[in-house]
Structures are given as C-alpha cells and as structure tokens.
Amino acid sequence: MKPTDLVTQHFTRLRTDQKSALTRLGIRTIRDLLYHFPARYEAAGPTGTVAAVTPGTEVTLYGTIRKPEAKKSWKSKRPMAEAWLEDASGRIKLMWFSQPYMAKMVADGMVVKATGRIAGTAAKMYLANPEIDKSPVSPEDVHDTLFKKEEGAPIIEDALYAIYPESRGVSSLWFLHAEKKLFEAHVHEAIQDPIPADILERYNLPSLATALVWVHAPMKKGDSEAARKRFAFEEVFAIQLAMQRERAQTLEEKALQVQVDRKSLDAFVESFPFPPTGAQRRSINSIIDDFEQSHPMRRLLEGDVGSGKTAVAAATAYMVATSYPPGRKSGTLQVAYMCPTEILAKQHFSTFVSYFKDHPIPIGLMTGSECRKFPSKIRGEESAKVSRAQFTKWVANGEIPIVIGTHALVYKSLEFQNLAYAIIDEQHRFGKAHRQKLTRKGDISPHLLSMTATPIPRTLALTIYGDLDVSLLDEMPVGRKPIITEVLDPEKRQLAYARLKEEMDKGRQGYVICPRIDEPDPTKELAVQAKSVKAEAERLKLHVFPDAIIDILHSKMTPKDKEDVMKRFSNGEVDILVATSVVEVGVNVPNATVILIEGAERFGLAQLHQLRGRVIRSNNQAYCFALPESYGPATKDRLKALMTAKDGFELAEYDLALRGAGELVGGRQWGISDIAMEAIKNMRLVEAARSEAARLIKEDPELTKYPTLKAIALRSDERLHME
C-alpha cells in the first residue's frame, strides 16, 4: 500500500469527536491540515530526551508516567505529589510541591508531555511543578522532531516543538502526530506550489514543500520565521490577485458619464453651513475626475468620525443628480445611497434634505418600514410619506434622482431608470452580494463610492481594498475641539457623573453605553458583571440623576420605537440616552457632549472609537469616559491607546504596531488569517505582493497559465466577501 493510501486510511478512521473538532477548526482536507500552522513553539532541551537534560533549563519532555503517589516532603512535611517520567533514554522524577492532587491527575502508564524547569543537582535532578499534557502519541513517535534524524547526524541544540491551536477532541500532540504521518507519506511534496518560481527567487522565499517542513518542524527559529514570511506573502498575494482581477474587470465596464459643471459644484459646496476642509475638497475633486472617465469609478472614502464624509457624498451626488443621460435633456442620472441601519438611513436623509433645501432636486428614503419623498407636494420644506408602490414607480421613471435607504435598495422590485452612482456607507457591513446587486442593476455599471469611518492602517487598506482607489479625510472641520478622553476605575465613576451633570446644567445631553440589554436570568445562566441598558437606566434615574429625563435604545426595539426615541433625543426632549452599541455608527446629535461607556474592556478599540465619535458632532468641548468593570494592568495598557491617540488613524497604526491587527481591525472582521494579519505590519511585503499581482493580471487577466494560483485567489475572494 502506498504511503499516501495509508494516510487516507488513517484519517478515515477518526472518531466522531475528532472529526467534529477538525471541522470547528476549519480543517476539512489534507491540505487544510498541512496549513494548520503552530500557534507558537517551545524549546524542548538539547535533544528532548531525559538523558540530555541539565539543571536550570526549561524543557519539554515526552514520556510514560510511572508510580505516581501523594506524600509529604521529608523536612517541611508539606503535601506534594511525585512520579517518574520514562523515555527511551532514561527516567527523571517529577515533583509537584503543595499539589498532592496531581497524583490523581496522572496514572501509571499514561503517555504525557511534561513541561517545566529542571531543578536539583546534576546527580539528583528532578522536574519541578511540570505542566502535564496527556498525549495519545507514544514518546518514540514524537522524539526529537517530526522527522527522525539520520544516524550520525549532529545534535540540534535549539530544535523547537510546535504547539498547535486545539479544539475539544484533538490536542496539540494529536496534530504533531498527524503532521508527522503526512510528512512520512511525502504528501507535502505532492502539492503544487501556487507561487511562480521566479517570484520565490526574487523575494528569497522558500518553496511550498520546504516552507511546510520549516513551519511544522523548525530546527531553529529562523526556519519558522522564513516559512511564516512565505505563507504570509502567499495569502496577501492571493488577496491582491483577487483585487487586481476585479480592478481589471472594472476598467472593461462602461459607465454613464457625468456632466461636470465645476462652477455649479462650487456654488453648491459654498451653500454648506460650514466651510469645507482641504481634505473634503481634495476628495470631491478626485471623485469628480473619476466621473469624467468612461469606466466606472471604484473608490474608498476613509474618514475619521466627524470628518465630513456625508458632505462629500452630497456634493458628488449633486453633480450626478444635475446631469442628463446621453442625448436627453430631461430625466436626470440617479444616485443610490445605501446605509447599514434604518437609523443611519433616516439621519442621512435628513442631512441631505438640509443640504438640498434650496435646490429643486427630489430626494427619496426607502427602508424596510417606510418610503418618503422630499419635497412634499403640500409643504415643500418637508418630506411626505408615500406608498411603496408609488415610490418604486417614481424611481423607475427617474422622478427621484437621489434615493437613500437600507439594503431595501437592492430588492428586485426597485428598478432605477438611470443609476449612475452608488454610495455605500460603512461598506464592510455589507456582503459582496449586496454590493453586486446595487452596482449591477442594468447593463451599465454605476460609479461606486465606498465609505468607512473604521480607521484602517494603510497596509491593511492596500490589501483588502486593493481594487479601490483611496481618498482620505484626515482633517477635522474648522473649530472642532479634540475630545477629552479619560479611563476611570470603578471608584472614580463619580467624576464622570459630575461632568455629565455639569453639561446637562448647560442644556447639553449625554449617552451612557452598556454592553447588554437585559439583566441575566439567574436561573438560566451565571450572573455577569456587565451592566444592562434597562437596569442601568433605572438605577441612574433612582440614585444618580433623579431630575433628568432618561430613555433607552437597543437593538430589540421595533424600528418605530427606535425612531421615536431618537427623535425625542435629537429634539432635546431626553437628557440621557442609555443604549447599547446600536448607536455606534452614524447617530448624529450635535447637542450631546458626554458619553460614558460602561464595561469598556468588553468593546474593541474600533468600537470604542466609534462610540466616542457620537459626541464629536459640534464645536462644543466633548468628553468620553471609559468605565471598565475591572482595571488591571492589561486593561490599562489596552485603553491607554484610546487616551493618547489623537485620531482613529493614529489609533489604528498604534494598535497594529503593539498587538498586530488586534481587535481594532481583526482577521475575523476581514476574513484574513492571523499569519497574514501579522505580515500586514510589513509595508514592503504588501507592496511587493501588490506589484507582482498587478503584473501577472496585466500579462494574464484570467490566470490561465496559473490554475493553482487562480484557485487560491478565488478562495481569498470568497473569504473576503463572506456575507
């Protein structure tokens, strides 16, 4: 029987719990198993054998437990446990001081991995308080390394043991044993390397077969680092190929050309209630330049909270809504503006109405609960509610040039007559299917502007938005004061309450954010410390702000109830809004100047930054108080970045440098593995992958010469655009 047949036979005999564990870890094929990389490595002594250990060293040994027993130490009579660990080279005593229960945790004949420090003298050594990992693998199978060294080969002084991410049913040692079987069958040599040989040589990267050996069984630290660099390049390269293919396809598509009247545009921008920043003007000009091209624009507008993305969207939408289709002088081009939530869609509708009130351009709102049109036939300065049937008819015949809404805009029942411009707000919250439905309504592809307030490091933006041109709003409106942010331990929360009281005395308002909606049911789940919206609102009313008008907002409320609450808060009828992170994106109440975030350590830095942005909506001094439930060193270090970074971009780069991509722009959010997220710290690697991808796509747009490369590019595209 061939070695590969033995491997297949071995893995078809897995227990049900092992198969379930592998599925949870995303391992469904032999290739997936080879690409299940170690999370870290441990030094295991000079050779990983009992005979080779020396006092004072940290070691990892594999062996069989013999004669475990609980006893008391000879001098101090302190309770302890003892056992012997045997391997092919000898045996060593294991001693657990003040842990007599360890004698029951191990059994005679049990095969284990023991990690700890060698204590005692050379004549009488023992392994002190070792950590024990029960192993289904015999010590002989994992001795030295994944591979048996050739007879007479020199001893490797710094050989490393791989430690793998685990799941219930498969331990790290199970993976060590499984990878060994794959390598013995030479499975790694049978997989075609997707990266062309000339690229590997140009960037001094190991081949796939070599990298797989080095990542699972490094003889030295440099082996694993070189392998990880190669796999990071491979993943970023695959993503860039997917992005460059999309970019090339876009250049082949046709767009409705927008007639750009720059004098008219300048007059519209001058009518804004504030002077535009230089960054806003640059972004508007870049978009207008794109409108004059024959192919559709694909652009990302990245701007910190409060930097004025909506104004850029309004100015460019004005150009489209005052342009006519080719050969016609009636029925203008149309704009679709898609928002992730109903609250945000209604807010943008109101903002657009304020910008367009002196311009005779109809604006529509379409959400799951209602349709509205501005101006109203009866009262021109207001909007009117209309039936869905009437609304869709007006959009279809071109009577409503600008339509703002939620994902309701991609319904089949809504057809645009001349859709020329699609704007997607907080675009990463929509799946690829939503974006494609909106940008492929008809034979002509509309220009696409994606907008985000999530701060993204430049290297990550180059990777995940490789198909887009990027405009950056890196200036705040004139007169906007930096928000004062403080992290307070539980004993100092009165300082936050005092500031909120001062602001309310000035006629201002505030938010209190809680991690959960309801208190937990003590009969069904363990009680948790996290404050809930409902209980905290009641507590604040009874014990802290008895004279204040307090209301609540959370995701389980009906759209109408949410709207009513936000309307009252916007109108100044509510002093304090106690809410979940449902207010994270886009809620705009300029009179709110204080935000208290309870359980701050439960939120990611990106979320905290977005929540803080709710009170940077005017030129009044704003305050943010992060109130963690526990305030240990880890929480202090993480939240310190929130206080020191002057804006979201600095926060993103700071977080990337300290913790990798971390929770600010984590791999789960973007569909990128940990190994690639770490590589995104390396601008040279990202730019190299990007330039190589662009070159290959230019030479071979469909990658017909590189079928393996095309397959991994398609897989990357699917991961990046998961719904």
Image (cartoon, rainbow, N blue to C red):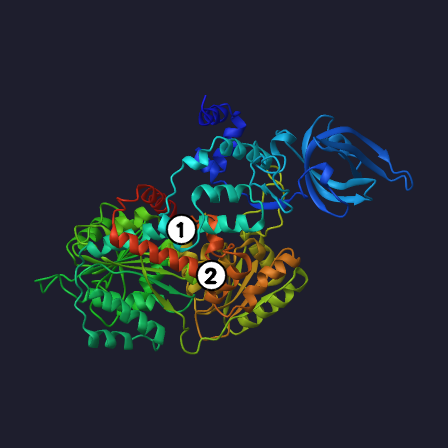
Quarter of the image where one finds residue 310: bottom left
Estimate the x, y position of residue 188 in percent, counting from the top left: 45, 37
- First in sequence, mark 2 or 1: give its number: 1
List the residue tagged with mark 1.
200
Q: Residue at x 66, y 57 (%)?
A: 632
Taking the spot 51% from the left edge, 41% from the top edge, the residue there is 213
Q: Residue 187 in the image: x percent, y percent?
A: 45, 33
- Compared with 304, 635 (above or below) is above
Q: Secondary structure at mark 2?
A: helix
Disc 1 residue type? Leu
Left or right of 66 in this view: 410: left
Q: Count how many numbered circles sit on residues in the image.
A: 2
Q: Nearer the viewer, residue 170 or 24?
A: 170
Quadrant in which the N terminus is drawn: top left
Which amino acid lies under the numbered mark 2 shown in the image of this protein? Gln
582 or 149, which is in the foreground? 149
Q: Decide: marks 2, 1 in contact (CB < 8 A)?
A: no
Marker disc for residue 545: none
Quarter placement of the C terminus: top left
State the residue position of label 2. 610
Q: Is residue 284 left or right of residue 567?
A: left
Q: Position of residue 232 (x, y in %)?
A: 45, 50
